[in-house]
Amino acid sequence: MADSDWHTNCTLSDIAQRIDAAHSVVILTHVKADGDAVGGSLALVRAIAASRHTSPSGVACPAEAWFTGPLPLWLSAVSRQTKSRSIGATDPLPALDPDLVVIVDTGSRDQLDCLADWAEARAERAIIIDHHRSGDAHLAALRYIDTDAAAVCQTLAPLCASLVGVPSPAQLDESIAEALYLGLATDTGWFKHSNVTPAVMRLAADLLETGVNHERLYQNVEQRDRPARLRLMARALNSLEFALDGACALMSIRQKDFDETGAAPQDVGGLVDIPKTVETVRVSVLLTELGPADKPTTKISMRSKGGPNLIDVNAVAARLGGGGHVQAAGAKLQCPLDEAKARLIEALE
Ligand SMILES: [Mn+2]
């Protein structure tokens, strides 16, 4: 469900004022947080802590980030003990009732997972900061949505600077800058995608000025695979097939591939991009079979290559009840993998 009120209704300085006035702030983001979600959440907690002259890892820190679903394997390498919690579907909700909720990198009720009801009940004191094209506006009274931003961290950078009282992100503390750089780098495919603009590169340069170590961050985030992930990658590549005269690459991962390789759901991340190296491929699709066997669900991830023949995968995903961005989108279908594949090909055609 997305609504027509999905647009900006406040300024970043309104948001900074609300944050400054709050005694306690909880930052929420989408389930299965990625680099932008984690980076944006950590950057805000650190900036709020810095603005109050407290430690972002201390008990006195007035802000904390809450995550749901599986967390990235690299989280501990970037978290620096910044105040956060991971909340599972069966966990009791935290007793903390903050006076401000900031939702970053999503505005979709479904994406808030087990915190959806909790967040919805606090919409009057919630702020959404996002860059996605659709969302549930009723989740927050204040919304700042910039669909031109490559990453939510691009929007959060000037907000963080304003919170800590510096004129430019180049003057931020390196720990805040690293979190922002993480979001900017990962949402642009480490500065490869079409969303890389002069403003993205200028912000990246400003963040590097603070002492962010690009190579260490890249190693921490992108070069820490377990061997099981490569075994899963081999299964995915082995399933590779082409449709639409080679313009569409399809890979399938079935439940038994997870079982037999020992790979975890988060090991799937990034596999969908691999077939884009084939010249004829305009869209690459990964279908993942999710359990249980009696109620099969298939997750579809799509990535499209830029250029004159661009396929808008957000539009394809929308036809299947999903969404995302022009070049990266997905959907979840309540059907077996082979049926999902047929429906997808039909939608692509
Ligand atoms: Mn993002």
Image (cartoon, rainbow, N blue to C red):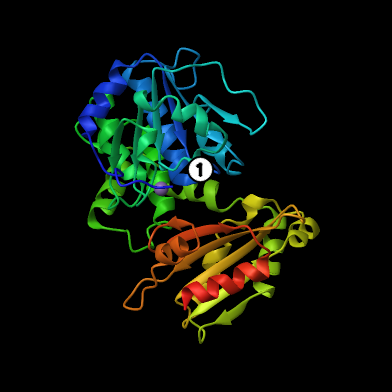
* Side of 86 relative to 261 (left or right): left
Among the 4 quarters of the image, the one containing residue 183: top left
Mark 1 within 8 Å of ligand 1, using the beta carbon:
no
Residue depicted at 46% across the width and 32% down the height: 28
Residue pointed to by mark 1? 110
Residue depicted at 60% across the width and 74% down the height: 342
Q: How many marks?
A: 1
Among the 4 quarters of the image, the one containing residue 287: bottom right
Residue 236 visible here: no
Residue 36 visible here: yes
Q: Compared to 120, does 3 lie above or below?
A: below
Residue depicted at 48% across the width and 57% down the height: 322
Q: Nearer the viewer, residue 43 or 213?
A: 43
Q: Compared to 63, does 277 lie above or below?
A: below
**Looking at the picture, which amino acid does disc 1 mark?**
Asp
Residue depicted at 35% across the width and 44% down the height: 152
Q: Residue furthest right?
A: 260
* Side of 208 relative to 255 (left or right): left
Q: Compared to 108, does 300 lie above or below?
A: below
Image location (x, y in percent) of residue 40:
40, 38
Q: Nearer the viewer, residue 169 or 26?
A: 26
How many residues crowd mark 1 within 10 Å: few (<14), some (14–19), many (20+)? some
* Side of 129 relative to 231 (left or right): left
Q: Nearer the viewer, residue 332 or 84?
A: 332
Instruction: Indicate the secondary structure of the residue bearing disc 1.
Output: helix
Image location (x, y in percent) of residue 87:
60, 30
Image location (x, y in percent) of residue 58:
49, 16
Q: Compared to 189, does 90 lie above or below?
A: above
Q: Residue furthest bottom?
A: 245
